[in-house]
Image (tube, grey):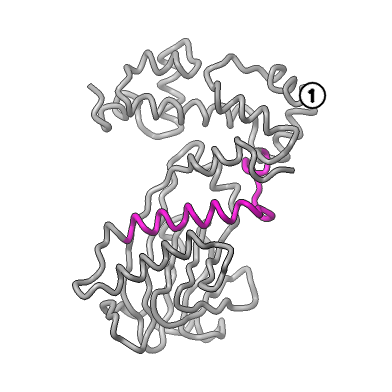
Amino acid sequence: MNSSTPAFQWLLENLELDASLFHVGRYCGAWQASTQGLARTSFHLLVQGECWLHLDEQPEAIALHRGDAVFLLRDLPYRLSSDPQAEQARCQPRGSMLPLTPQADDGVGLVCGFFHFRPGLSSLILESLPRYMVLRAGDQGLQAARQLFELIMAECERSEGPNPVMLERLSHLLFLYVLREHGEGGEDLGGLLTLARHVQFATLLEQLVAHPQNNWTMETMAGLTGLSRSAFCKRFQELAGVSPGQVLLSLRVRQASRLLREGLPVAEVAEAVGYQSVAAFTRIFQKVTGVLPGAYRRQFGGA
């Protein structure tokens, strides 16, 4: 199994998401905080002090120190707290954040935000990722990510205060670098990313990525893997967690989104991604993205 096949790298490089901040500040004294129930994925960057991460699914708390980062890629039951004991942490107040003060020698400074993954292909890739990831300040295997974190901490230490737009963009890049470097090991990756690393399916996925507009049948796809139709469908579902048809649809919608952003007419886009009927394309595109293709095109300035 190869962790760096072209299909695997393409999936990581084409993960589409946005980052938005909801907290930049400092907690003092006894406290707890959580985003559970607010969004599917969130991140917490520790820029001052130390605290504890409590996950309901894990008996032991995880100690976090300045320079560490936590990426919660599901809406998990969890809390950050000043207390290392889970029961005591649950009882701590949900305090208000104070302004982030670079000169302060007490409290815990955090940059917190949400990741918003675009529907379709990026959502499928998200399902392939671990439930959570922790970046450690002392991890020598993540040099590019560490350099980005240093930029985030430098931004937080500006005398005039951090620029939220810069923090959002740096946090976005930090996650992509962590993900890329983490993917080189990839032991805890699954779903579509596992399929992309599988010697029997990597070539097929590369062809689907390169030519989503082709008239792909189950027999054609199975032929590229050397499996019978029934064995192919079963094994594909086992590895990817979704059907071949769902993957092909997601690749077509992603390609269509790119062409619409470039301003191509809807009818031309439909044909370019393999749909003979504009109505069928419109129905599928709206189902995946929640937006009609014409409205999506206008949103990005298409004439």
Side of 10 where 96 appears, left or right: left
20 relative to 183 in the view: left or right: left
Q: On screen, 143 above or below 128?
A: below
Name the residue type under label 1.
Gly
Magenta part of the protein: which range? 167-195
Instruction: Judge by depth and name the residue closer to the eye, 77 or 301.
Output: 301
Taken as a whole, is the magenta stretch helix, strand or loop?
helix
Question: Residue 108's quadrant in the figure?
Answer: bottom left
How far across and down, in percent of the image, does residue 148 sit?
41, 62
User: Which quadrant, please, contains the N terminus?
Assistant: top right
Q: Residue furthest top?
A: 276
Q: Is residue 86 above or below residue 260?
A: below
What residue sits 48% from the left and 43% below the top?
Answer: 15
Quadrant holding the C terminus = top left
Q: Which residue shows up at 48% across the image and 39% down it?
A: 14
Q: Describe the element under mark 1 as helix, strand or loop.
A: loop
Residue 136 point in image, percent of width and height = 54, 70
Residue 77 position (above or below residue 251): below
At horizontal 62% and vertical 17% (from top left) the residue drawn is 216
Alpha-carbon neighbours of circle 1 within 10 Å: few (<14), some, or many (≥20)? few
Tell me residue 202's x, y (percent). 68, 33
Residue annotated with mark 1: 226
The picture places residue 226, in percent across and down from the top left corner, at: 79, 24
Residue at the location (44% across, 70% down)? Answer: 34
Task: Please state which of residues 197 and 296 is positioned toward the viewer in this rendering.
Answer: 197
